[in-house]
Image: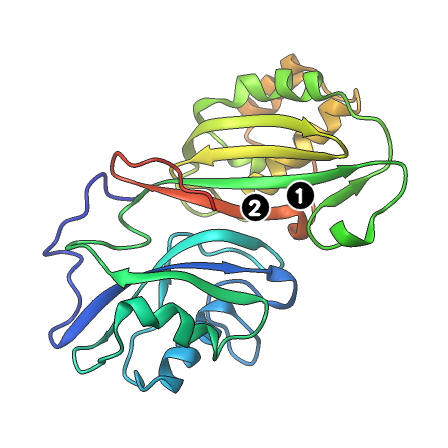
Amino acid sequence: MSAPESDPALFAPPAGFVRLRLTVAYHGAQFAGWQSQPQTRTVQDTLHAAFARLGATDAARPVAAGRTDAGVHAEAMPAHIDVPGSFRLAPERLARALNAHLPSDLAVLEAAPAPAGFHARFGCTGRAYTYRLLVAPQRHPLWADRALHVSGPLDANAMNAAAAPLLGTHDFAAFATREDRHTVRELRQLEVSVTGIIWEIHVQGESFLRHMVRGLVGTLLLAGQGQLTPDQIGTILSSGERAQAGANVPAHGLTFSGAEYGKGVYRRR
Protein backbone atom coordinates (compact mmCIF):
# COMPACT_ATOMS: atom_id res chain seq x y z
CA MET A 1 0.00 0.00 0.00
CA SER A 2 1.47 3.36 -0.95
CA ALA A 3 1.69 6.24 1.46
CA PRO A 4 -0.66 9.20 0.89
CA GLU A 5 2.18 11.59 1.62
CA SER A 6 5.90 10.78 1.51
CA ASP A 7 7.65 10.92 4.89
CA PRO A 8 11.01 12.72 4.41
CA ALA A 9 12.66 10.78 7.24
CA LEU A 10 11.27 7.40 6.21
CA PHE A 11 12.18 7.79 2.55
CA ALA A 12 15.50 9.64 2.90
CA PRO A 13 18.49 8.27 0.94
CA PRO A 14 21.30 6.62 2.90
CA ALA A 15 23.95 8.84 4.48
CA GLY A 16 26.42 10.07 1.89
CA PHE A 17 23.97 9.64 -1.00
CA VAL A 18 21.61 11.97 -2.84
CA ARG A 19 18.38 10.97 -4.52
CA LEU A 20 17.57 11.77 -8.14
CA ARG A 21 14.14 11.60 -9.72
CA LEU A 22 13.92 10.22 -13.24
CA THR A 23 11.23 9.79 -15.85
CA VAL A 24 11.98 6.88 -18.15
CA ALA A 25 10.34 5.36 -21.21
CA TYR A 26 10.92 1.97 -22.75
CA HIS A 27 9.73 -0.41 -25.41
CA GLY A 28 9.25 -3.59 -23.45
CA ALA A 29 9.43 -6.24 -26.18
CA GLN A 30 13.04 -7.22 -25.49
CA PHE A 31 12.99 -6.73 -21.72
CA ALA A 32 12.07 -9.35 -19.13
CA GLY A 33 10.27 -6.60 -17.23
CA TRP A 34 11.48 -3.86 -14.89
CA GLN A 35 12.73 -5.95 -11.98
CA SER A 36 16.31 -7.21 -11.87
CA GLN A 37 16.64 -10.92 -12.65
CA PRO A 38 19.71 -13.11 -13.08
CA GLN A 39 21.00 -13.76 -16.59
CA THR A 40 18.25 -11.85 -18.39
CA ARG A 41 17.76 -8.33 -19.71
CA THR A 42 15.73 -6.01 -17.46
CA VAL A 43 15.05 -2.29 -17.42
CA GLN A 44 16.34 -1.88 -13.87
CA ASP A 45 19.69 -3.52 -14.58
CA THR A 46 20.18 -1.72 -17.90
CA LEU A 47 19.55 1.68 -16.31
CA HIS A 48 21.78 0.85 -13.35
CA ALA A 49 24.61 -0.13 -15.70
CA ALA A 50 24.34 3.23 -17.51
CA PHE A 51 24.88 5.06 -14.20
CA ALA A 52 27.93 2.90 -13.53
CA ARG A 53 29.38 3.88 -16.90
CA LEU A 54 29.05 7.53 -15.86
CA GLY A 55 31.05 6.88 -12.70
CA ALA A 56 28.25 6.18 -10.21
CA THR A 57 29.48 2.65 -9.54
CA ASP A 58 28.13 2.69 -5.97
CA ALA A 59 24.65 3.85 -6.96
CA ALA A 60 21.73 1.83 -5.63
CA ARG A 61 19.52 0.04 -8.10
CA PRO A 62 16.82 2.41 -9.42
CA VAL A 63 13.29 2.10 -8.03
CA ALA A 64 10.23 2.57 -10.27
CA ALA A 65 6.61 3.50 -9.59
CA GLY A 66 5.51 0.23 -11.17
CA ARG A 67 7.35 -3.04 -11.70
CA THR A 68 6.13 -3.92 -15.18
CA ASP A 69 6.16 -7.48 -16.48
CA ALA A 70 8.01 -8.85 -19.49
CA GLY A 71 6.86 -7.25 -22.73
CA VAL A 72 5.04 -4.32 -21.10
CA HIS A 73 5.97 -0.81 -22.28
CA ALA A 74 6.24 2.52 -20.43
CA GLU A 75 5.56 6.01 -21.75
CA ALA A 76 6.45 7.94 -18.58
CA MET A 77 7.65 5.81 -15.68
CA PRO A 78 8.74 7.75 -12.58
CA ALA A 79 11.79 6.30 -10.88
CA HIS A 80 14.41 7.31 -8.36
CA ILE A 81 18.02 6.38 -7.79
CA ASP A 82 20.38 7.10 -4.90
CA VAL A 83 23.85 8.12 -6.09
CA PRO A 84 26.98 8.96 -4.04
CA GLY A 85 27.27 12.58 -3.00
CA SER A 86 30.50 12.68 -4.99
CA PHE A 87 28.59 12.16 -8.25
CA ARG A 88 29.08 15.52 -9.93
CA LEU A 89 27.26 15.29 -13.24
CA ALA A 90 24.72 18.14 -13.27
CA PRO A 91 21.08 16.95 -13.36
CA GLU A 92 20.31 19.11 -16.40
CA ARG A 93 22.98 17.15 -18.34
CA LEU A 94 22.20 13.75 -16.87
CA ALA A 95 19.39 12.60 -19.17
CA ARG A 96 21.44 13.19 -22.31
CA ALA A 97 24.51 11.58 -20.76
CA LEU A 98 22.58 8.48 -19.69
CA ASN A 99 20.91 8.13 -23.07
CA ALA A 100 24.33 7.98 -24.72
CA HIS A 101 24.88 4.76 -22.76
CA LEU A 102 21.40 3.28 -23.10
CA PRO A 103 20.01 1.08 -25.89
CA SER A 104 17.49 2.42 -28.36
CA ASP A 105 14.53 0.81 -26.56
CA LEU A 106 15.16 2.65 -23.26
CA ALA A 107 15.52 6.38 -22.62
CA VAL A 108 15.60 8.81 -19.71
CA LEU A 109 13.21 11.63 -20.55
CA GLU A 110 13.93 13.79 -17.51
CA ALA A 111 16.33 13.84 -14.56
CA ALA A 112 16.30 16.18 -11.57
CA PRO A 113 17.07 16.24 -7.84
CA ALA A 114 14.28 14.42 -6.01
CA PRO A 115 12.10 16.44 -3.62
CA ALA A 116 12.62 15.65 0.06
CA GLY A 117 10.84 12.42 0.95
CA PHE A 118 10.27 11.35 -2.63
CA HIS A 119 10.02 7.59 -3.17
CA ALA A 120 8.99 6.48 -6.65
CA ARG A 121 7.17 3.38 -5.48
CA PHE A 122 5.92 3.94 -1.94
CA GLY A 123 5.02 7.59 -2.47
CA CYS A 124 2.95 6.83 -5.57
CA THR A 125 -0.79 7.30 -4.96
CA GLY A 126 -2.03 6.38 -8.43
CA ARG A 127 -0.92 4.46 -11.49
CA ALA A 128 -2.31 4.62 -15.02
CA TYR A 129 -2.11 2.02 -17.77
CA THR A 130 -3.30 1.98 -21.36
CA TYR A 131 -4.07 -1.20 -23.24
CA ARG A 132 -4.22 -0.77 -27.01
CA LEU A 133 -6.23 -2.85 -29.46
CA LEU A 134 -5.83 -2.86 -33.23
CA VAL A 135 -9.41 -3.51 -34.32
CA ALA A 136 -9.16 -4.23 -38.03
CA PRO A 137 -9.65 -7.16 -40.42
CA GLN A 138 -5.91 -7.38 -41.10
CA ARG A 139 -2.85 -7.01 -38.88
CA HIS A 140 -0.65 -3.93 -39.22
CA PRO A 141 3.16 -4.24 -39.00
CA LEU A 142 3.61 -0.87 -37.26
CA TRP A 143 1.41 -2.03 -34.37
CA ALA A 144 2.68 -5.61 -34.21
CA ASP A 145 4.32 -5.28 -30.80
CA ARG A 146 2.34 -2.37 -29.35
CA ALA A 147 -1.32 -3.39 -29.76
CA LEU A 148 -3.34 -6.59 -29.69
CA HIS A 149 -4.83 -7.37 -33.10
CA VAL A 150 -8.57 -8.12 -32.94
CA SER A 151 -9.91 -9.04 -36.36
CA GLY A 152 -13.57 -9.54 -35.45
CA PRO A 153 -16.12 -6.87 -34.54
CA LEU A 154 -16.21 -5.36 -31.06
CA ASP A 155 -18.91 -3.30 -29.33
CA ALA A 156 -17.28 -0.43 -27.41
CA ASN A 157 -20.55 0.51 -25.72
CA ALA A 158 -20.96 -3.02 -24.40
CA MET A 159 -17.39 -2.96 -23.11
CA ASN A 160 -17.94 0.30 -21.25
CA ALA A 161 -21.21 -1.01 -19.81
CA ALA A 162 -19.36 -4.09 -18.57
CA ALA A 163 -16.67 -1.89 -17.04
CA ALA A 164 -19.13 0.09 -14.88
CA PRO A 165 -19.69 -2.60 -12.18
CA LEU A 166 -15.94 -2.93 -11.73
CA LEU A 167 -15.33 0.69 -10.75
CA GLY A 168 -14.79 1.44 -7.08
CA THR A 169 -13.32 -0.61 -4.26
CA HIS A 170 -13.76 -4.37 -4.60
CA ASP A 171 -12.05 -7.69 -4.06
CA PHE A 172 -10.41 -8.30 -7.46
CA ALA A 173 -9.22 -11.85 -6.77
CA ALA A 174 -11.15 -13.06 -9.84
CA PHE A 175 -8.87 -10.97 -12.08
CA ALA A 176 -5.47 -11.72 -10.50
CA THR A 177 -2.92 -14.43 -11.21
CA ARG A 178 -1.36 -16.39 -8.32
CA GLU A 179 -1.89 -13.53 -5.88
CA ASP A 180 -1.00 -14.03 -2.22
CA ARG A 181 -1.50 -10.43 -1.14
CA HIS A 182 -4.66 -8.76 0.10
CA THR A 183 -6.82 -8.59 -3.04
CA VAL A 184 -9.03 -5.55 -2.34
CA ARG A 185 -8.19 -2.64 -4.64
CA GLU A 186 -9.77 0.62 -5.77
CA LEU A 187 -10.35 0.88 -9.52
CA ARG A 188 -10.71 4.56 -10.42
CA GLN A 189 -11.03 4.32 -14.20
CA LEU A 190 -11.78 1.56 -16.69
CA GLU A 191 -12.85 3.09 -19.98
CA VAL A 192 -12.70 2.23 -23.67
CA SER A 193 -12.03 5.01 -26.19
CA VAL A 194 -12.03 4.57 -29.95
CA THR A 195 -9.94 6.48 -32.48
CA GLY A 196 -10.04 4.85 -35.88
CA ILE A 197 -8.64 1.33 -35.80
CA ILE A 198 -6.80 1.89 -32.51
CA TRP A 199 -8.88 1.38 -29.40
CA GLU A 200 -7.48 2.34 -26.01
CA ILE A 201 -8.58 0.93 -22.68
CA HIS A 202 -7.59 3.35 -19.91
CA VAL A 203 -7.11 1.93 -16.44
CA GLN A 204 -6.30 3.89 -13.28
CA GLY A 205 -5.97 2.93 -9.64
CA GLU A 206 -3.67 3.24 -6.68
CA SER A 207 -2.15 -0.19 -7.23
CA PHE A 208 -2.92 -3.41 -9.06
CA LEU A 209 -2.65 -7.13 -8.44
CA ARG A 210 -0.48 -9.40 -10.56
CA HIS A 211 -1.86 -9.44 -14.13
CA MET A 212 -5.02 -7.67 -12.92
CA VAL A 213 -5.08 -5.12 -15.73
CA ARG A 214 -4.61 -7.81 -18.38
CA GLY A 215 -7.38 -9.89 -16.79
CA LEU A 216 -9.74 -6.91 -16.77
CA VAL A 217 -9.05 -6.23 -20.44
CA GLY A 218 -9.56 -9.89 -21.36
CA THR A 219 -12.93 -9.82 -19.62
CA LEU A 220 -13.99 -6.61 -21.40
CA LEU A 221 -13.09 -8.23 -24.71
CA LEU A 222 -15.60 -11.00 -23.97
CA ALA A 223 -18.24 -8.34 -23.31
CA GLY A 224 -17.34 -6.57 -26.55
CA GLN A 225 -17.80 -9.86 -28.41
CA GLY A 226 -21.25 -10.39 -26.88
CA GLN A 227 -20.17 -13.25 -24.61
CA LEU A 228 -20.71 -11.45 -21.28
CA THR A 229 -23.29 -9.00 -19.93
CA PRO A 230 -22.80 -6.38 -17.19
CA ASP A 231 -24.79 -8.57 -14.79
CA GLN A 232 -22.42 -11.44 -15.43
CA ILE A 233 -19.44 -9.17 -14.76
CA GLY A 234 -20.80 -8.49 -11.28
CA THR A 235 -21.19 -12.21 -10.68
CA ILE A 236 -17.60 -12.85 -11.77
CA LEU A 237 -16.35 -10.11 -9.46
CA SER A 238 -18.19 -11.48 -6.42
CA SER A 239 -17.13 -15.06 -7.15
CA GLY A 240 -13.44 -14.40 -6.53
CA GLU A 241 -12.64 -17.22 -8.95
CA ARG A 242 -10.02 -16.48 -11.59
CA ALA A 243 -11.43 -19.13 -13.95
CA GLN A 244 -14.70 -17.18 -14.24
CA ALA A 245 -13.11 -14.07 -15.80
CA GLY A 246 -11.57 -13.59 -19.22
CA ALA A 247 -8.06 -14.77 -20.03
CA ASN A 248 -5.08 -12.46 -19.57
CA VAL A 249 -4.47 -10.56 -22.79
CA PRO A 250 -0.88 -10.56 -24.12
CA ALA A 251 1.60 -8.17 -22.49
CA HIS A 252 2.62 -6.36 -25.69
CA GLY A 253 -0.56 -4.26 -25.81
CA LEU A 254 -0.03 -2.85 -22.31
CA THR A 255 1.74 0.43 -21.54
CA PHE A 256 2.39 2.14 -18.22
CA SER A 257 1.16 5.63 -19.06
CA GLY A 258 1.49 7.78 -15.95
CA ALA A 259 1.59 8.15 -12.17
CA GLU A 260 0.19 10.33 -9.42
CA TYR A 261 1.92 11.61 -6.28
CA GLY A 262 -0.02 13.20 -3.44
CA LYS A 263 -2.65 15.45 -4.96
CA GLY A 264 -0.90 15.64 -8.33
CA VAL A 265 -2.39 14.56 -11.61
CA TYR A 266 -1.69 11.56 -13.74
CA ARG A 267 1.25 12.40 -15.91
CA ARG A 268 1.42 11.24 -19.52
CA ARG A 269 3.94 12.23 -22.14
Q: Residue 96 carries which label?
A: none
State the residue lying farthest toward the top. 231
The residue carrying mark 1 is 248
User: Label 2 crowding class (10 Å Cα cut-off): few <14, some 14-19, many 20+?
Assistant: some
**Residue at 34% in and 71% down:** 94
Could you tell me if residue 78 is visible in this image?
A: yes
| Label 2: which secondary element | loop
Q: Which amino acid does label 2 sit on?
A: His
Number of callouts in the render?
2
User: In which image quadrant can residue 151 be found?
Assistant: top right
Q: Is 106 located above or below residue 25 in the figure? A: below
Residue 267 x %, y %: 40, 42
Could you tell me if residue 176 is visible in this image?
A: no
**Residue at 22% in and 59% down:** 114
Confirm or deny contact between disc 2 and disc 1 (CB under 8 A): yes
The quadrant the N terminus occupies is top left
Left or right of residue 84, residue 219 in this image: right
Residue 169 x %, y %: 41, 25
User: Label 1 crowding class (10 Å Cα cut-off): few <14, some 14-19, many 20+?
Assistant: some
Of labels 2 and 1, earlier in sequence is 2
The residue carrying mark 2 is 211
Q: What residue type is labelled 1?
A: Asn
User: In which image quadrant can residue 86 be found?
Assistant: bottom left
Which of 100/181 is in front? 100
Left or right of residue 219, residue 257 in this image: left
